[in-house]
Amino acid sequence: MKKRILTLALALMMCLTLVPMTALAAEVEPPVISDLKIYYTDGELSAGLEFNIIVPDSAKSMDGFYLVDEASFDGGEWEGIGFDGDNKENGIRRTYPTTLNADTVVKYRVRYQYLVGVDYYFSPWSNVLTLNGKIDLNASDWAKSELEKADALGLIPDSLKGADLTKPITRAEFAAVSVKAYEALSGTAAIPAVNNPFTDTKDVEVLKAYNVGITAGTAEDKFSPDVLLNREQAAVMLTRVFKKVSVAGWTLATDGDFPLDYAKPAAFADDAKISDWAKPSVYFMVANGIISGVGDNNFAPKATTSDEEARGYAQATREQALVIAVRMVEKLGA
């Protein structure tokens, strides 16, 4: 019996030695960072960088674990800076004070270094955040003036900076726009949910939208981040932002208890195609000049046939989403 146990133990050890450590290293996901900004110390004599971080569960279980970072200043080479504190919790991190001007263009990213056996490995890099970068408006001419306002108001999320804004917007991207609108209207930074209820995304902006109450996802454990958004869904999500900021006691669960008080405009010709749950939001947005129809007195709320779906009928584009966010902040900000 002892001989058999020894044989099994030796066999197990041989199997483990055949598993490359790089395979283990690949199991650690990168962190997600957001809300990059400059902070000052000693009055305003020196400055560092501040950002929020979401730590994946795969990193929390590692030994010899700590964060490393890199930054690029004004288009220069990537260089390490360092942190004040390296724990495994979600939250705010700060770099060591360095030489920064208020208008310095900064690109920033982080990753993990961790111990497996006697060797150290790195996780992939996080997403890259840019501070003070000039916005590159890859957009339609009709939208550019309002998109410049969106940039000035801080409504363009990092995921859309430099992107083709004429393309349809996904649910995750619109969640990020909605979060920016909420922060602009409320003057309060949105905090991501610590416990992620979704199995199909770890997007920090989605977790902020969920925590604020802008969205509950498409199912109990699904958000469907890559599904394209339609026009009535855009109206509903931004109306929730308005209610969260303006209506005391409002929550997504009690939304039906808080009807909006507004003069309903004349019905659209395609009113029957607008979902009942979306109609109050659609007409509220129309009444306030935030969203308009598409011509011929139609709203085009959603695709109702396979042909309409194939043609992208009623899909909201990225630039349209940002424009209505600008109008919402300007018209309802008071």
Image (cartoon, helix red, strand yellow):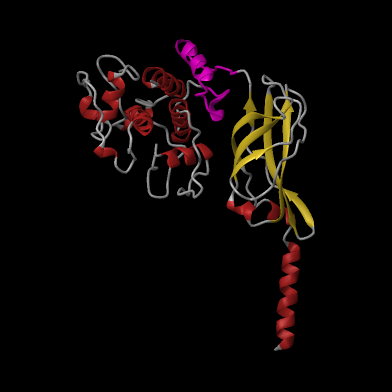
Residue placed at 76% from the left, 60% from the top?
117
Q: Front-most of 306 and 232?
A: 232
Magenta residues span: 135-164
Quadrant showing the C terminus: top left
On whether residue 147 falls in the magenta region, the answer is yes
Observer-nearest of 81 and 283: 81
Q: Is residue 135 visible?
A: yes
Residue 182 horizontal/vertical position (percent) = 44, 30
Of 74 and 124, nearer the camera is 74
Can I make out residue 224 in this image?
no
Give the quarter of the figure containing the N terminus. Answer: bottom right
The magenta stretch spans residue 252: no
Give the vertical position of 230 relative to 74 (above or below): below
Q: Is residue 293 left or right of residue 110?
A: left
Q: Residue at x 77, y 28 (%)?
A: 77
Q: Position of residue 246 (x, y in %)?
A: 35, 29
Q: Which residue extends farthest right?
A: 118
Residue in the picture at 29% in, 38% down? 255
Q: Quadrant of residue 306?
A: top left
Indicate the position of residue 34 as horizontal and vertical percent values.
58, 35
Relative depth, front residue between 72 and 312: 72
- Label tally: 0
Judge whether 186 appears above or below 123 on screen.
Answer: above
Image-based side of 291 in relation to 320, left or right: left
